[in-house]
């Protein structure tokens, strides 16, 4: 499968099973939980695979520096977390007190790059971590899923003479990147490595090849890839491409690569080497995460002081909240229309040279649409950019919408907006990723940085009767206290509590859309020219409806109605063309989308509020 067709679920190994009572007790939180075929989690992954999910992206599973590997060395919260109110500060205080030595961390703290993490093994001693990691990969393959590893070669957990310093104690000052004064650079939050140095670059290549050959890993996601030289990532690609089934037991050319192409720190703007950033990796076959449509869909950015800044899928202008940060109605409308242009670029696969009419009426290329002073479109072909609406970083999608949608938004409407937001990534050209559990409205109780927030805030609840994780207390103070005044009234608000009706409906609707995405060839175009020919936005321009996007794609017509009212989109040029609702929606799970209609006499598509409808010519 080419990278441009990848549909990816991002998953933390412990989150997957630690709260799943249907997983074997001694497997919960470990690699072997993926071998429990009858657990709720495994069944849900198979359902996703059947609908088109192709990869499970595992958060770091190499040897971590912060989690005690032996159960006897770990602590647990010393209180009954279930007794406190949904908006209480007690839960986070209790979890935080145990955090330094509990079993939880995201794992972006590398100790040994090419050894499986011991805390995920049933016994960290001996060979079990190696065998059980391989059994996990084998089980995922058996469920129809490939495995991506999240790798973190850009920094180490420690440097110098620390007990947890490895590379710097072997050759001091070589493997770590140094500043002009001789200190180790820490722009990545930890002690940066120097993959521009020959042997650190070789370590990266050799490590990735080992995971591919010995553990049969099918892909790699590079954390903070912009801190690597482009040449280093291309060396990884070349080394993988040389692997063959006959010689190495693996087809290296089929292994996918993508990463965070952010541009910052001491290496920013190619200061030390040509970086593996978004713009530099275009055309290489290595994808980068695209934040353009993500921000337009959610609204604002991940570091806004006021989390109530709205976007396309959170009610900007069409369903305003009370936050003064959104500005006047006129300002909201202008920003929403610009967001719609950003989402259009995202739907093309973030293509730099794709030409379309923007909401001001100008003919522009994707690269001419502004994203915070940078080009929105930077990709040379579909597959260069990876679309997503949420990931482990920042608030989960449900929590972002909780901050942004009007507080009184009913649970059913929250679920519909969740599906619509996810659809902007799922229905784009190129690969897309979602955080595991997002189709189930997963919440982390408004935690924006849950890397060390324990099982209480992070565990996935596969059974809808256990809720979605919302209302488990105020999130940990270290990264969230400034947002507590916004969070407290929301956590106590019953309108934000969802149940099985909303959770099941959201997941089923998402799976219907993913089936369409992965079975319709029009979503898998290979070049900019083919996208230019097949994909258009027929109603884009100064008269475009705020909060509604209409996309024509081959024999499909897609309407994303993010407004709280039914919309009618008249495409005069299509009058007389025999469209009907896509069969997978017409016979699918969502009764609301089934009320969508098409009038062939006028070319008018009518779609209910907060709905993604896909029509197909007969």
Image (tube, rainbow, N blue to C red):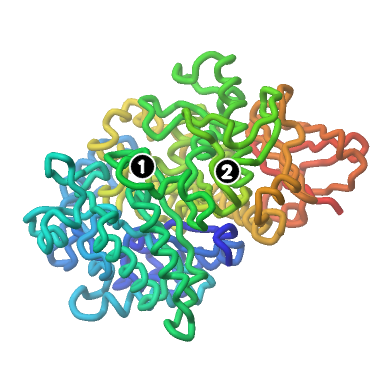
Residue depicted at x 34% and y 59%? 151
Note whether 486 is above or below 282 in the view shown. Answer: above
Can see residue 416?
no
Mark 1 falls on what kind of element?
Answer: helix
Residue depicted at x 63% and y 38%? 344
- Compared across the picture, whether 200 is left or right of 420 comes to left
Mark 2 falls on what kind of element?
Answer: loop
Can see residue 178?
yes
Note whether 388 is above or below 403 in the view shown. Answer: below
Where is residue 138 drawn, in percent x and y? 43, 77
Q: Which residue is mark 1?
A: 270
- Specify few, some or many for label 1: CA neighbours under 10 Å numbering under 14, 14-19, or 20 or more: some
The image quarter containing residue 325 is top left
Marking on residue 70: none
- Compared across the picture, whether 189 is left or right of 21 comes to left
- Compared across the picture, whether 473 is left or right of 98 comes to right
Note whether 25 is above or below 289 in the view shown. Answer: below
Marking on residue 350: 2
Residue depicted at x 58% and y 26%? 336
Between circles 2 and 1, the one closer to the viewer is 1
Give whichever of discs 2 and 1 has the lower sequence position.
1
């Amino acid at each position: 499968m080419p990278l441009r067709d990848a549909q990816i679920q991002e998953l933390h190994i412990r989150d997957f099973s630690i709260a799943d009572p249907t997983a074997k007790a001694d497997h919960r939180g470990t690699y072997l939980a993926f071998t429990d075929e009858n657990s709720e989690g495994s069944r849900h992954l198979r359902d996703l695979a059947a609908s088109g999910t192709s990869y499970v992206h595992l958060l770091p599973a190499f040897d971590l520096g912060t989690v005690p590997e032996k159960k006897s060395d770990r602590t647990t919260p010393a209180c009954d977390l279930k007794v406190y109110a949904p908006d209480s500060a007690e839960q986070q205080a209790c979890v935080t007190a145990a955090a330094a030595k509990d079993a939880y961390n995201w794992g972006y703290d590398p100790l040994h790059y090419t050894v499986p993490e011991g805390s995920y093994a049933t016994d960290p001693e001996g060979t079990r971590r190696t065998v059980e990691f391989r059994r996990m990969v084998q089980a995922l393959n058996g469920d129809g899923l490939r495995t991506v590893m999240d790798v973190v070669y850009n920094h180490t957990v420690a440097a110098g003479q620390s007990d947890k310093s490895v590379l710097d104690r072997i050759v001091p000052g070589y493997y770590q990147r140094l500043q002009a004064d001789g200190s180790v650079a820490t722009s990545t939050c930890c002690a940066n490595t120097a993959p521009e140095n020959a042997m650190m670059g070789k370590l990266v290549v050799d490590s990735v090849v080992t995971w591919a050959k010995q553990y049969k890993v099918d892909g790699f996601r590079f954390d903070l890839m912009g801190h690597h030289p482009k040449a280093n990532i291309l060396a990884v690609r070349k080394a993988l491409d040389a692997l063959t089934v006959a010689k190495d037991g693996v087809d290296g050319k089929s292994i996918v690569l993508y990463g965070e192409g952010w541009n910052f720190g001491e290496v920013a703007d190619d200061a030390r080497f040509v970086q593996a950033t978004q713009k530099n990796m275009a055309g290489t076959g290595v994808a980068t995460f695209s934040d353009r449509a993500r921000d337009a869909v959610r609204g604002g950015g991940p570091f806004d002081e006021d989390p109530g800044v709205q976007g396309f899928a959170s009610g900007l202008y069409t369903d305003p909240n009370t936050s003064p940060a959104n500005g006047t109605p006129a300002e909201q409308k202008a920003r929403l229309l610009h967001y719609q242009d950003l989402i259009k670029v995202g739907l093309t696969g973030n293509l730099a040279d794709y030409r379309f009419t923007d909401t001001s009426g100008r003919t522009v290329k994707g690269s001419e649409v502004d994203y915070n002073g940078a080009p929105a479109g930077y990709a040379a072909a579909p597959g260069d950019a990876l679309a997503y609406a949420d990931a482990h970083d920042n608030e989960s999608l449900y929590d972002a919408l909780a901050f942004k949608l009007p507080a009184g938004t009913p649970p059913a409407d929250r679920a519909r907006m969740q599906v619509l937001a996810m659809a902007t990534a799922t229905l784009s050209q190129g690969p897309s990723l979602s955080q595991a559990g997002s189709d189930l409205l997963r919440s982390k109780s408004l935690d924006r940085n849950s890397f060390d927030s324990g099982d209480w805030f992070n565990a996935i609840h596969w059974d809808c009767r256990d809720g979605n994780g919302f209302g488990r207390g105020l999130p940990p103070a270290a990264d969230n206290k400034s947002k507590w005044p916004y969070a407290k009234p929301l956590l106590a608000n019953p309108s934000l509590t969802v149940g099985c009706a909303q959770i099941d409906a959201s997941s089923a609707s998402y799976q219907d859309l993913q089936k369409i995405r992965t079975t319709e060839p029009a979503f898998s175009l290979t070049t900019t020219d083919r996208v230019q020919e097949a994909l258009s936005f027929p109603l884009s321009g100064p008269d475009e409806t705020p909060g509604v996007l209409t996309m024509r794609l081959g024999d499909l017509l897609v309407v994303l109605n993010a407004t709280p009212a039914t919309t009618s989109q008249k495409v005069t040029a299509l009058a007389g063309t025999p469209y009907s609702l896509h069969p997978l929606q017409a016979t699918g799970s969502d009764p609301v989308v089934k009320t969508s209609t098409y009038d062939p006499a006028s070319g008018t598509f009518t779609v209910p509020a907060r709905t993604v409808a896909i029509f197909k010519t007969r």
